[in-house]
Amino acid sequence: MKRIGIFTWFNVQNYGTALQAFALYTFLAKKNEVYLVDYFNTKKISKLSYRIKLCVKYFLAPVLKIRDCFLSGNFIKGAKISRCYRNIKIYRCSSTKKISGLEKFDILLTGSDQIWNPYYLEDFYLLGFSKNKNKISYSSSIGVQTIPDEKKDVYKNCLSHFSHIAVREKSAEFVLKALLNRNDICTVLDPVFLLSKNEWTEFYKRGISRKTRNNVKNSNYIFCYFVGSRSEYKDYVEKIAGEYNLPVIYIPSSENRNIALDGKRINSAGLEDFLCCIANAALVLTDSFHATSFSLIFEKQFIEFLRFNRTAEKSQNSRILDLLEKYCLDSRLFEGKSIPAKEIDYSVVTEKIKKDIDFSVKYLNAACGVEF
């Protein structure tokens, strides 16, 4: 049994972020002693601009936005999401405290989510602070097509010391192979695929709310979940709902709380409600990577929207486009013209996913030195 520290984002009001952390922890903990590493960068506090932001955030913003938070179900949602961490071991450290204790871990593992996105980069998640020789990544995501020139040295200096590197997007594999001059970098699946459809079903059935259970009981609805806030989304949904002649159920994301669609809105949905709405839908409409991933896991028909303009410099479309291309589902993209008509043949797609899961598990076997 190995002692593994997972370095990833968690404890935020984002369904995908929480579910990927929960999935990776749950899978690895089947054979190991595992901790999620909770990190706080105290060095930022010394910056005047950061102090001002903290002042606004903690003293003014709550007073001004408390009504909006209650209306959006924000507090309740956050409490529901946090339930998944109740039985998870967490190691808390900061830039000035307990970092030395991380060297006691047998393996330092980064992943998943966009922890290596150059526009949100925290050097800590590149593990540059550690001399531990067994540093590995699993499904760490860059999220964009290229790394800015001014940040390439940071990636190169830190990642060159990783014993194993696996990323989530094929595009990131190409970028890092060229940057690090390594041929052993590979692409693996997001951690949510490491748990089976049955495991996720058991998970959501334990905690779905009565409201969600009543809303989804006939499974004859379109489920919508959008992270982006493009103005055309509302028209897209109305067009597709009219074509299918089905009612709409939607959950607002943390990034898109003000979205208003013609349908039933579930404000304070927990992780279980989110999964339940996907698992029982006749059709899923989304621009979310993880909503798309769970549509694949639950073998649902879905239509994909693009959150960013294709030419946007900081576009995160690559993770969606890579996933669709991997399973030959590019035709599921909808950009305002013809609605995808041909249904997904899951007898083919699921078989491909099983092979990728096998590859991902074999990677973890080799990287961690443990047979899963």
Image (tube, rainbow, N blue to C red):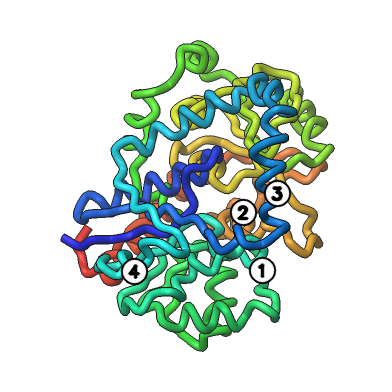
- Which residue appears at 48% of the width and 63% of the height? 140
Is the Cβ of the residue at disc 1 closer than 8 Å to that at disc 3?
no
The residue pinned by badge 2 equals: 320
Reply above or below: 301 against 136.
above
Reply above or below: 22 against 48.
above
Instruction: Give the camera-side residue of 109 and 47.
Output: 47
- Horizontally, is 108 left or right of 251 in the view? left
List x then y, in percent, for residue 343: 59, 39
The residue pinned by badge 4 equals: 100
- Which residue appears at 78% of the width and 26% of the height? 238
- Which residue appears at 20% of the width and 62% of the height? 2
Find the residue positioned furthest to the bottom: 181
- Disc ID at residue 53: 3
Instruction: Give the camera-side residue of 297 and 144.
Output: 144
- Horizontally, is 217 left or right of 56 in the view? left
Mark 4 Cα within 10 Å, few/some/many (few <14, many 20+)?
few
Q: Amino acid at mark 2?
A: Ile
CA distance for labels 1 and 4: 34 Å
Q: Earlier in the sequence, mark 4 or mark 3?
A: 3
Q: Earlier in the sequence, mark 1 or mark 3?
A: 3
CA distance for labels 1 and 3: 30 Å
Is the Cβ of the residue at disc 2 closer than 8 Å to that at disc 4?
no
